[in-house]
Amino acid sequence: MNTTKEQLIRDIEQLLNRYEGLRPTHIDPKLLHFMDEATLRHIIDSVLRQQEKTNETNLEWLEQFKKQ
């Protein structure tokens, strides 16, 4: 596996491990060996979008507790 793919896999792990208090996620590079760089980049994009959506939802939820 080339170093770009290895870096992309590390990037995915870092994104998945952004939140403290959760058990760390470790991805076995052998599982992703068959994926090309475009697929790995798509996974990163998808994780980022999901995290952004979660943050927006959390902000909406928190807004209900704001003092008027």
Image: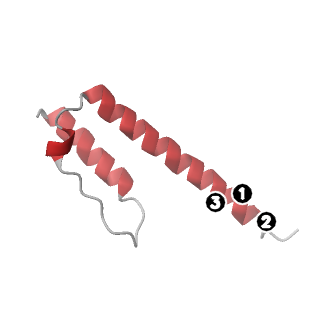
Say the numbered circle drawn on residue 58.
3
Residues packed near mark 3 inside 10 Å, few (<14), some (14 to 19) or many (20 plus): few
Q: CA distance from mark 2 to mark 3?
A: 10 Å
Q: Which quadrant of the figure contains the C terminus?
A: bottom right
Q: Where is residue 65 shown, x and y percent of the image?
A: 77, 70
Q: Secondary structure at mark 1?
A: helix
Residue 3 occupies which quadrant of the picture? top left
Say the numbered circle drawn on residue 64.
2
Answer whether labels 1 and 2 touch (C-beta < 8 Å): yes
Q: Where is residue 50 shown, x and y percent of the image?
A: 51, 46
Answer whether labels 1 and 3 touch (C-beta < 8 Å): yes
What kind of residue is marked 1? Answer: Glu
What kind of residue is marked 3? Answer: Asn
Q: Secondary structure at mark 3?
A: helix
Judged left or right of residue 49, residue 30 is left
Judged left or right of residue 23, residue 29 is left
Say the numbered circle drawn on residue 60.
1
Q: CA distance from mark 1 to mark 3?
A: 5 Å
Out of 65 and 36, give the one closest to the viewer.
36
Residues packed near mark 1 inside 10 Å, few (<14), some (14 to 19) or many (20 plus): few
> Is residue 4 depicted above or below 31 in this figure?
above
Judged left or right of residue 56, residue 12 is left
At 79% from the left and 65% from the top, the residue drawn is: 64
Q: Where is residue 49 shown, x and y percent of the image?
A: 51, 42
Residues packed near mark 2 inside 10 Å, few (<14), some (14 to 19) or many (20 plus): few
Q: Secondary structure at mark 2?
A: loop
